[in-house]
Amino acid sequence: MPEQQASPGGDPDSARRPGRDEELLAALRRSDEDAFRMLVREHGPFLLRLALMHVPSRAIAEEVVQDTWLAALDGIDRFEGRSSFRTWLASIVLNKARTQGRRERRVLPFSFLGRRRAEGRDEPAVDADRFQSARDQQPGAWARPPVDWDSPVERLSSDEARRVLFEAIAILPPRQREVITMRDISGLSAAETCNALGLTATNQRVLLHRARSKVRAALEHHFQAEEPSR
Amino acid sequence: MTQGRIAQLSCQELVELITEYLEGTLAPADLARLERHLDGCDGCRAYLDQMRETIAALGRLPAESLSPQAEEKLLVAFEGWRKGSRG
């Protein structure tokens, strides 16, 4: 993703400031442009990420985010603060992005792949052939156990590892992709994620489990390819 | 804790409980079984570490910001909204 702009100072998504949102919202209701600008900057990366899960290009994702803000402005007096502002924005952007994504579906190779895979509740977290079978001495014990990753922080921050992460997420079934993006990339709580996606706690956890298991497996595969000796 | 009666957790079962473990939603008895297994199993400890490292790496992915052009368009739209609905 060469056109990606890394925001300086890390991921603003992870800065949780609900109190600050409340102040900015009050200012926004008084038509304060600076408050609007700050909210747009603060939540922009988060919304863009959610939009990008469903539409094929950055340009379309930006349009979806713009539409989201317009809808949020129009609905601001109806937002009652029962959910967090971010959760509310997330449900708007996902709604719009899903609609747009359906229109663009034929040009969405990754999502197409994702849709063809079941959301799958019973797919194993780790391939069954990594474990001893019923005929072996210790059925269910590792046959080929995972090995510790050397200097994981450095290696997982490389461009190559990031590409593996993005690709692993891109081919997940849509709901797994939404859950892992909200929980692990954007740092929302389980409750916020359930709220924005309309999921039960159990369902959210199952989707997160499947998604994380596949992303871990993709990284393991990548690292093993890097070090064929291990 | 019920002892003996509950079969030991296998590695294959443990990997399916890892998210519940990390989310803190395991029942106390299951948590105890899982931790007992981890104490004696290098493979599952490596698996847990890899999972934690995966989650941390996802949290470190760089964020993309809205382009200045899109932000500019939004501010123009905001002006219209302010005049129109708040006029």
Image (spheres, grey):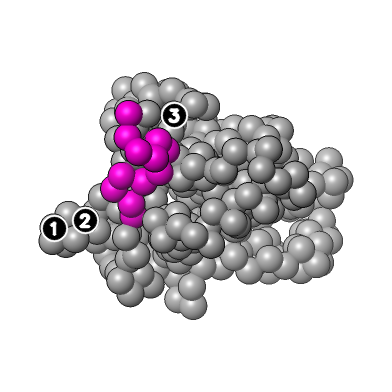
How many discs mark residues in the rendered view? 3
Q: In this view, does B77 lie to the left or right of A172?
A: right
Tell me which amino acid carries mark 2.
Gln
Q: Does the magenta stretch include residue A214?
A: no
Q: Mark 1 points at which residue?
A: A228
What kind of element bears circle 2? helix
Which portion, as a residue range, is magenta? A135-146
Q: Can residue A119 be seen in this view?
A: yes
Q: Which of A43 and B73 is in front in this view?
A: A43
The reply to whether label 2 and label 3 mark residues of one chain is: yes
Chain letter belonging to callout 2: A
Label 3, residues with CA under 10 Å away: few <14, some 14-19, many ≥20: few
Q: Is residue B35 left or right of residue A163?
A: right
| A109 to the left or right of B12 | left
Residue named by callout 2: A224
Give the letter of the chain under mark 1.
A
| Label 2 vs 3, first from the N-terminus | 3
